[in-house]
Image: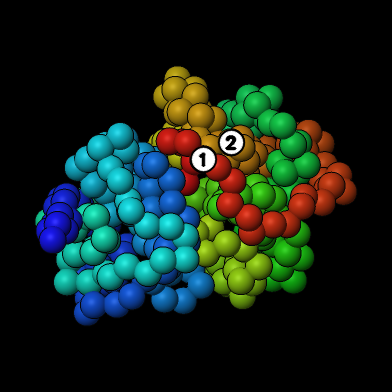
Amino acid sequence: MTRQASPREVPGAGSPLTQTVVTGPWRQALVLARFPSALYLSTGAHHEVLPVVASDALMLPTAVRLSAAARELEWGVQPGDTVTVGRSEIRLPALRIRVVREWRPARVRAVPHLAEPGLLSELADMLSTHMRTPELVDQATVLCRAARSGDDAEVRRGTRPLLGAGLGLTPSGDDVLCAVLLVLCGVGDPAPIALLGAAVRDRWAATTSLSASLLEAARHGYAVPEVAALVTCALRGDLAVAHEALTSTLAIGHTSGQDLVAGLAGSLRVLAEDSPQARFLYPAARPAQALPSARTVQTAGRRTP
């Protein structure tokens, strides 16, 4: 009788954002999606997702990061399978992941001194040149303005057509929402963050579980390093570093990078409205074309969450 091989042991590092799940009691987790560089596990409520990623994968803020590269891994599971998580372990048929340390995800913190309105306007224009869907920039502008003015009804109207709009694990509209939340975190006023965060949470069943989890992380300022760096540099008015971070951000996913930049550009327009001439430069948004809403999974490479 052939003896079955023991699971391979791989060390990993856990995020403080998902520490409770990883170190808590044993639980069953559902495999939502599997890619060569990442595995996505549903661990509870709709927005509770644990990404398990290879060392060369995108550094999602909620992820367990492994020491092995994607080419060295064989997950041995399919979407719909269940695995076991808890006690600082993730047990797969072919892998035994031991979470032996913690890593600190990138975070957008309040910027002490925002750039001058004119510079923010210049940055918004520069970012807008990289957009495939200008309507998303306009929607971000309307939404960010409503959140900063405390208009709850307008925030909810602006959130509704964005949440879950688009294809893939992180739809385009959700990427825009993430960017607006990150900008608000960088400004540092908790009221607009709470307003937009509540509108998102009330409707996040309309989007994918992974996207809902990343929206929740963005509400607290967390994002992948490339995006956190771009938002922070833009708010500071650091053009040189912002250009570098922009290149890395645009490389994320099929369209996620562009959609995140659209949300940033639209939000910077609002911050630039402190300038007397800005309201003439950035009038009310054009009616947006509706994006398809889907919760299908697209085939992804390294740069797709």
Depth order, front residue of 215/228: 215
Dots 2 and 1: beta carbons under 8 Å?
yes
Give the x, y percent position of residue 277.
Answer: 75, 34
Give the x, y percent position of residue 192.
Answer: 57, 63
Please tell me whether residue 143 is drawn above or below residue 151 in the rendered image.
above
Please tell me whether residue 125 is drawn above or below residue 95 in the rendered image.
above
Asked which quadrant contains residue 17, the reply is: bottom left
Residue under numbered circle 1: 300
Q: Mark 1 belongs to which amino acid?
A: Ala
Give the left or right position of residue 183, taking residue 202 as reference: left
Circle 2 crowding by C-alpha within 10 Å: few under 14, some 14–19, many from 20: some
Give the left or right position of residue 255, taking residue 210 as reference: right
Please tell me whether residue 44 is drawn above or below residue 137 in the rendered image.
below
Asked which quadrant contains residue 100, the reply is: bottom left
Asked which secondary structure carries label 2, the reply is loop
Residue at position x 67%, y 42% from top?
A: 266
**Can you tell which mark lies on residue 254?**
2
Extreme residue in the top direction: 240
Q: Earlier in the sequence, mark 2 or mark 1?
A: 2
Q: Mark 2 belongs to which amino acid?
A: His
Give the left or right position of residue 164, taking residue 134 as reference: left
Q: Would you say residue 215 is visible in this rendering?
A: no
Residue at position x 58%, y 36% from top?
A: 254
Disc 2 to disc 1, C-alpha distance: 8 Å
Give the x, y percent position of residue 77.
Answer: 37, 57
Give the left or right position of residue 182, taking residue 1 as reference: right
Q: Would you say residue 240 is visible in this rendering?
A: yes
Depth order, front residue of 185/225: 225
Depth order, front residue of 94/2: 2
**Can you tell which mark lies on residue 51?**
none
Residue at position x 66%, y 49% from top?
A: 167
Mark 2 vs mark 1: give the one in front.
1
